[in-house]
Structure formats: structure tokens, C-alpha cells
Amino acid sequence: MRTHLKGINTIKRKLATGEVRTYYYHRATGKRLQGLPGSPEFLASIAAAEASTRQRDKGTLAGLIREFQQTAKWRRLAESTKAEYRRIFTFWEDQFGTCPYPALEDKAFRRAVIK
């Protein structure tokens, strides 16, 4: 059974020997995927690339927002509240998403954000 995997970039290149070779890349991370589509090695490399995208925000404001959205407290909120929080989170993530935890605790940084 053949399935179409989203987020896979297929590149064909002609080598110096004249041979045409196909390479596969994970679109979000740019990591090259090993093996042929459908093989266990290929699926494992996709899983590893996906895992790296989930952990790229670790230790930042964006990561803190993602962690909150995985909690039971988040799940108990009404849909209208979640929609409003997502709007606010998007703003803060665009502005300061890559900011690490220690900077969030710095008084000078907080003063600059409030201004």
C-alpha cells in the first residue's frame, strides 16, 4: 500500500557519473531522510525529524506556551477562552518566542516588554 507523506521534499540530482539519484528531505527541518520511502529506516528518520521539531522550542517562551497547551488546565478551558488565548499567545510568540527562560525573569527585560 502506497501513501503520500506530507512534509517530504523530493530532490533529484544528476551525479558526475551520469546517474540520477533521488534524495528525500524533511521539509520543516531540512534534514535528509535515510532509506527509501516505505522502509523502516525511512520512517524512523521521519520520526526523528518530527521529534526534533517538537523539542526546538524547549527552554524558550514558545516552549512554555506549548507545555501549557498540553496541560489538563488548558483542556478544561472553554473553546472561546482557548481561541482568545491562542490569539494572545501568537502575538507573544511572534514577538518573544525565542527568548530563553532566564531572560523572562530579568527585570530589565520585563521593563522593556511593558514599555
Image: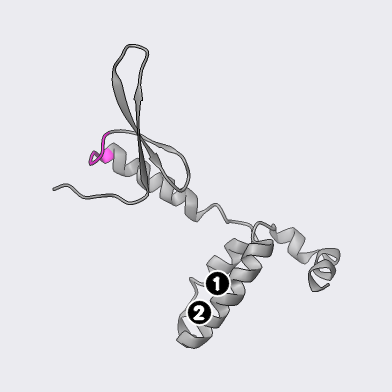
Which residue is located at x 37 percent, y 13 percent?
16
Which residue is located at x 58 percent, y 68 percent?
65
Q: Quadrant of residue 17?
A: top left
Which segment did they paint magenta?
A: 36-40
Residue 31 on image: x %, y %:
45, 39
- Residue 110 vs residue 81: left or right? right
Which mark, by number, is residue 85?
A: none
Vertical relation: 50 (above or below) 19: below
Asked if the residues shown at circle 2 and circle 1 are in contact, with their CB atoms under 8 angstroms apart, the answer is yes
Vertical relation: 74 (above or below) 66: below
| Residue pointed to by mark 1 | 68
Q: Mark 2 belongs to which amino acid?
A: Trp
Q: Quadrant of residue 106?
A: bottom right
Which residue is located at x 81 percent, y 64 percent?
109
Report if residue 39 lies within the magenta region. yes
Report if residue 79 lies within the magenta region. no
User: Which type of secondary structure does the marked residue at label 1 adopt?
Assistant: helix
Disc 2 crowd rating (10 Å Cα; few below 14, some 14-19, many 20+) is: some
Which mark, by number, is residue 74?
A: 2
